[in-house]
Image (cartoon, helix red, strand yellow):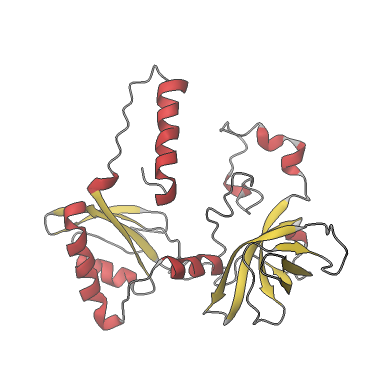
Amino acid sequence: MTTTTAQAGLVQRRIEHCRQVLWPELDVHVVNVTEQWAAFALAGPQSRRILAEVIDGLDATNTVLPHMGCATGRFGAAVVKILRISFSGDLAYEVYAPAGRGEALWQAFIEAGRRLGITPYGVDAMNALRIEKGHVAGVELNGRTTPDDLGLGRMVKRDRDFIGRRSLSRPGLIDPKRWQLVGVAPTDQKTLLPPGAKIVSNPDRPAPKPCLGELTSTTFSPMLGMPIGLALLSAGRARYRERLFAVSPLMGQQVEIEIRRPVFFDPEGERLHA
């Protein structure tokens, strides 16, 4: 099992709760092997080419290793696990190697990709990429949102049981006025969006101003050449193209914004499935 780095401890705790409290009769043992593996992402239009050059015994074609697929290969004597998943919205893979071989594998990818312009990228770049693609993260997965709020309702299998199914049928969690995930952009396409700003319809209205939602993630998009962001907004999906205001009393800022769909770049996922 793999999970997001920030939530690894929480997931392990939940699994142990299930094992010890909910189903103590099951003969199951849970072992955290995080430190035994080195893991990193290989992403971009040339990632398949580099992966095939470095990893032996791997068929990385779309037929054999499609998006959301997994496979194994070899790097020297080490067995390497490959997951074709993407947080950047581009063709990408997560690579898992034994911890002792992680640095050597990293260097092998760097050398193989040098002629193609490969470069390491960090958290800030990854955050910009995921906002461009409308990928939700911790600030949107805040414990108060439902799958439908985030546009992920299609992933819930309504014909079978699951944790939280009863809660999702409650009136408050199916109210069409719930805060829903949307994209936002400044109407002038140049003013930076204040992180954490509240969304209102009329910033000049005397306090208290009705709060319609809030900006959860903001960045400057190199692909679009302008600031963009993600927000949770009341009845958000019914407000596309509506103009509202992002107001930050803390920063003394207010920005006129346009509500958009949350996927700003490559909405059909062509690069993801290349």
Tally of marks? 0
Looking at the image, which is closer to me, 83 or 101?
101
Using the image, determine if residue 202 lies above or below residue 94.
below
Residue 180 image-quadrant placement: bottom right
Question: Considering the image in quadrants, where does the N terminus appear?
Answer: top left
Q: Quick check: can you spot residue 36? A: yes
157 relative to 13 in the view: left or right: right
The residue positioned farthest toward the top in the image shown = 25
Residue 69 coordinates in the image, percent (x, y)? 38, 54
Residue 143 image-quadrant placement: top right
Q: Quick check: can you spot residue 79? A: no
Residue 23 image-quadrant placement: top left
Looking at the image, which is closer to me, 45 or 216?
216
Question: Considering the image in quadrants, where does the C terminus appear?
Answer: bottom left
The residue positioned farthest toward the left in the image shown = 77
25 relative to 188 in the view: left or right: left
Residue 225 coordinates in the image, percent (x, y)? 57, 82
Residue 101 coordinates in the image, percent (x, y)? 17, 57
Looking at the image, which is closer to me, 215 or 183?
215
130 relative to 45 in the view: left or right: right
The residue positioned farthest toward the right in the image shown = 206
Q: Residue at x 66, y 50 (%)?
A: 149
Q: Residue at x 24, y 69 (%)?
A: 109
Using the image, determine if residue 180 lies above or below residue 190.
above
Q: Residue at x 77, y 38 (%)?
A: 171
